[in-house]
Amino acid sequence: MSAIAWLQKSCAPLRKKAAYRGQSNDLLGEMKLKRIRWGPVLACGSLAILVSAAILLPPTNSKVISAMALPIFALMLIWLLLSMVGLCVYFYRAWRSVAVVPNKAAYIAWMSIETTFALAGLGGILWFFVITPS
C-alpha cells in the first residue's frame, strides 16, 4: 500500500466529519502555501542563520579568514532581502483588505500600529548600522 493510499484511507473519518460540517472533502489538496505561517518560518530561518554563523565563523579578534564567511554572509543578505519582500507583501495585502473587513476602524488602527512599529524597527536598524559612526 502506498503512502498516499494509506493517508487517504486514514483520512476517511475526517472527510466524513468535514462533510458533516459543510467543509471541503479534499484534505490532501488543501495543504497549500497559504496555510503556512510565514512569520515563524522567517524567525526560525533567521535563528538558524545566526546560530550557524556563530558556530562556523572565527572570533572577531582572529586574523584567520574563514572559508565559510562569504557563503554565510551571502545567505544572511538573501534572507534579509526575502524577509523585507515578505513584509512588504504582508503589509500590501493587509492594507488592501481594509475594504472587506467588517470592523474597519479597529483594523485600520491595528494596521497603523503594525506599520509604525515595522517602520520604527527599520529606522532603528538603519540608524544603528548606517548613520551611527563606528
Image: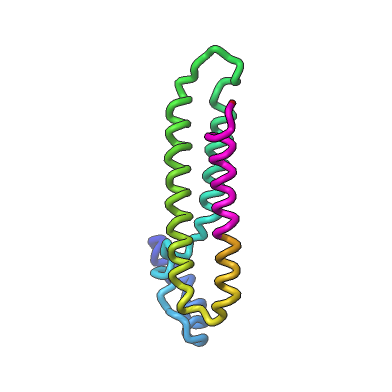
Residue 16: x percent and y percent? 49, 82
Q: Is residue 70 above or below residue 63?
A: below
Specify the quadrant of the image occupied by residue 105.
Answer: bottom right
Model colouring: rainbow
Specify the quadrant of the image occupied by residue 46.
Answer: top right
Q: Quadrant of the C terminus?
A: top right
- Is residue 84 found left or right of 58 in the rendered image? left
Residue 73: x percent and y percent? 47, 31
Q: Is residue 66 above or below residue 116?
A: above
Residue situated in front as seen by the camera: 16 or 46: 46
Point 49% across, 16% down: residue? 65
Q: Is residue 23 above or below residue 50?
A: below
Q: What are the residue bounds of the magenta stretch?
A: 115-133
Residue 9: x percent and y percent? 44, 72
Point 52% across, 13% down: residue? 64
Instruction: Name the dominant secondary structure of the magenta segment.
Output: helix
- Is residue 82 found left or right of 54 in the rendered image? left
Point 61% across, 16% down: residue? 61
Residue 95: x percent and y percent? 47, 67
- Is residue 81 found left or right of 61 in the rendered image? left
Q: Quadrant of the N terminus?
A: bottom left
Q: Is residue 63 magenta?
A: no
Residue situated in front as seen by the camera: 13 or 101: 101
Specify the quadrant of the image occupied by residue 117.
Answer: bottom right
Q: How many marks?
A: 0
Q: Is residue 74 above or below residue 90?
A: above
Residue situated in front as seen by the camera: 123 or 38: 123
